[in-house]
Image (tube, grey):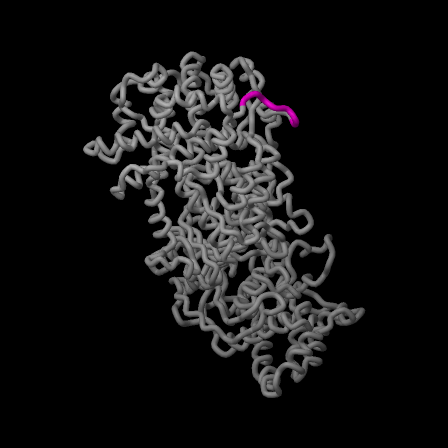
Amino acid sequence: MYTCPPKKKLRQTSITEMLKKPLSQEEEKKKHTSSSSMERGGHVKMKPAGTSSTQGGKSVRGKERSVEMRDVLANAAEQRIQSAGSQSVKKTMMGTITNNTEDREWRGVPLSSLPCLSADNLNVPDVVPSPDHAVLVRLPVSPGTVPLPHPSSHSDTWDQCHVRMPCSPKSQYPKNKDMVVPRWSVITEALSRKINSVEDLERAVLEYNSRYISKWKFRGLHHLLEQEFEEEERASFFNKTLPVMVQLALSLPDLVTRPPPLLLQGTTHSVTLSQMQIASLLANAFFCTFPRRNAKGNDTEYARYPDINFNRLFFHKEQRSLEKIKCLLHYFQRVTTKPPTGTVTFTRQAVLPRDVPKWEASRQSLPSLHVSSAGLIEEATGLLQVDFANKYLGGGVLGLGCVQEEIRFVLCPELIISRLFTQVLDKTDALIITGCEQFSRASGYSSSFRWEGPHEDKTPMDQWGRRLCQVTAIDALHFTKQPNIQYEPFYVNRELNKAYAGFKVIEGSGGIPTGVATGNWGCGAFKGNPRLKALIQLAVCGHIGRDLAYFTFGDQQLRDDLFTMYIFLKENNVTVGELTQALNHHGYRGWSDGSDLFQYVCHSLGGSYDSDTDQELSKDSADVRVKATPDVKEAEDAAGHPPEPSQTKKPPTDIANCFPEPGRTTRCPLSEEKILQVLSECDRIFENEKAKKKQGAGPTSDDSSHKTETQRKMEEQESEPRRADKTTHSTSDSNRLSESPRKGEDQKSELRRPDKQAQSSDSNRLSESPRKAEEQKSEFRRADKAAQNTSESSKLFRLLDEYDRQMGQAPHSTSASEPRRRFSLLEGAHRKLN
């Protein structure tokens, strides 16, 4: 990818300075309107990054400043000329061999190029018993056989650090007013009776949950089995599947010989279970046997855990709930017919406050990106697949919920057992599941969700019996009531930290970090902004060193906008820290609704968006002007030393001193924005002429035909007295535009050429070949003519000549007030010339 080394330093300085400058109200209005056009589906494209590279250049004295200014112009022209070359970079990244890019459903690198889990790249930790890893199966695991439990005999633990098992002797149940018996004996007796109908099943479950007789109603299960199931299906369930499910549930003491530990907040701990152990636990959840998990209230023991018993799922008659029950019944039919032989590891990963990255200081580059409007996260085999989780894992999977997380949990029911032992996720916690199997296929989303039949998961296993499938559950913040606060730095950093907890490679993992498959995390019911969440996840992957596969779920506009933004960031070598600074500064304004997010980030990082709306608004938009300060020392004192965005939680209030008060004007008609426009026009002139020379075309007869609307408007706004200065200074302007080696011009042009070596270097920068001297002279003459027709650029470069002279006399300063100091000098030079 093409980069311009001399400009990188300037661009980094520009990032820091631009982040210190809040936009004027009119600029913000302009960007807000242009972003609204983008949201309506208008095609938005990036301007080349070099258009604002002069902004924020470092201040040096005398001849060094003159050389730097010439380099800025030359580099800008060079990047414009070579912009055609960057198209090939974009073409390669879009995975396009032909010109039919619009037919592609994805952009960026091919999905197959991202590192993934495989036999040669086991980017997962080993299964080794330790104080931080409870392994409930006997090792080693033999392929093709059901793993044996560990320990071999039942060992009970009844405390607040382990799951309270329904088969524990300490789980007591009142048989009557005068007698208390082990609850497991009541469960065994109730489920051992013949169950021929839903009424029989409901009666058996309520026998050991008697306090809920008036509350629990299995209306949904009634409707499914008695109205939707055919007679043959209903008979098969009650005569074949259900009896084996009862046997599976009552085998719990033999399959799970010790209680799994609870995965508590703020701890990093793992639990490994066999698939048959999980099936037995889920069968007990189906029959609602887990004690102390039904009570509601903040003062109950399991108030900070999700519910696990299935009674809520059986209540709802909505179609999406019935479809979820179908998925679960199919799962039980599968595991009771052919017992699975694998294992699954659940790892709670907590990042301590001292280990949270300093995001704004990160120097890591952004990762490779694959962005697609087609496909699903679970189809990205071998990648770390993101579960858009509720902080209570599984969300509404046992209720009416039926969005990304709930659908994933019913397609892979082994994920549901995480609700049994995972405490509510904290702000820097995540749960990573390794080895889960998918049992069902489905279609639709929310109310349109439908079970479509069985799925045969052919994902290979590792040596411990875990499928090479890894899911990370991370919960986004809920912004339903106040969606605009998500852009504030506090909440942006919270989401960065949460994604970091989920994407961070588990300690002890080998191989190369796999890519992350994700999408619009927290952007449904939680009202997150997909563009903000995409940049957050991109930054986190870059910091960790994982590549990113982003699925937009059919949103082609988001796909194209995100990839366009990614191209801009990569071509400008933007780091994770610089991107984070831009996101945080975007939120400092306090009022943003996020519609201008990409435009604002691009502006902050030294570029800008270009769209038809932008061009129309630019005709009426006011320039950003700085206050006039005749004395440089006064300027520095007034501007102060505002802190860097990375060092403060609030926008620096003294930055406002660098801008005029409302209703107040200054004497300088040239803003920094207009200067950049003229420099861009100069670049355009060179690009056109070089393109003609490369094609072998002769001198053009009418250079004015290449002028843009911006250039014509500059000429119309120029007053008649300024036109008189055009002839006097045309030679100096020509030297500025072309870096011509001609000698004998006025004294100002001599100051711009410190020595013959620099002069020759600059001339070679703009000439294609030294052997074409005559063509180069012809090009210079055409540039001279274009400069003579541009009175605004004439004034600009005369102003810059005087500015460079003053810079050579002024004391050197690198303080935070440098932007204001530079423009004070520019304004003073302008007054002197006028």
The relative height of residue 581 versus residue 376 in the rendered view (above or below) is above
Left or right: 560, with 79 as reference point: right
Quarter of the figure with residue 81: top left
The relative height of residue 734 versus residue 458 in the rendered view (above or below) is above
Along the line of sight, which residue is nearer the eye, 121 or 594? 594
Q: Give the x, y percent position of residue 383.
A: 43, 57
Q: Give the x, y percent position of residue 208.
A: 71, 71
The outermost residue toward the right is: 177
Along the line of sight, which residue is nearer the eye, 383 or 431? 383
The residue under the point 41% across, 19% down is 801
Q: Is residue 424 magenta?
A: no
The outermost residue toward the bottom is: 232
What is the magenta segment's predominant secondary structure? loop
The relative height of residue 429 versus residue 97 in the rendered view (above or below) is above
Along the line of sight, which residue is nearer the eye, 566 or 517? 566
What residue range appears in magenta? Answer: 662-668
Residue 355 visible? The answer is: no
Q: Is residue 667 magenta?
A: yes
Q: How many marks?
A: 0
The relative height of residue 663 versus residue 242 in the rendered view (above or below) is above
Quarter of the figure with residue 597: top right
Left or right: 636, with 307 as reference point: left
Q: Give the x, y percent position of residue 569.
A: 44, 42
Residue 459 visible? The answer is: yes
Q: Give the x, y percent position of residue 409.
A: 56, 64
Where, quadrant-wise, is the N terminus in this rendering?
Answer: top left
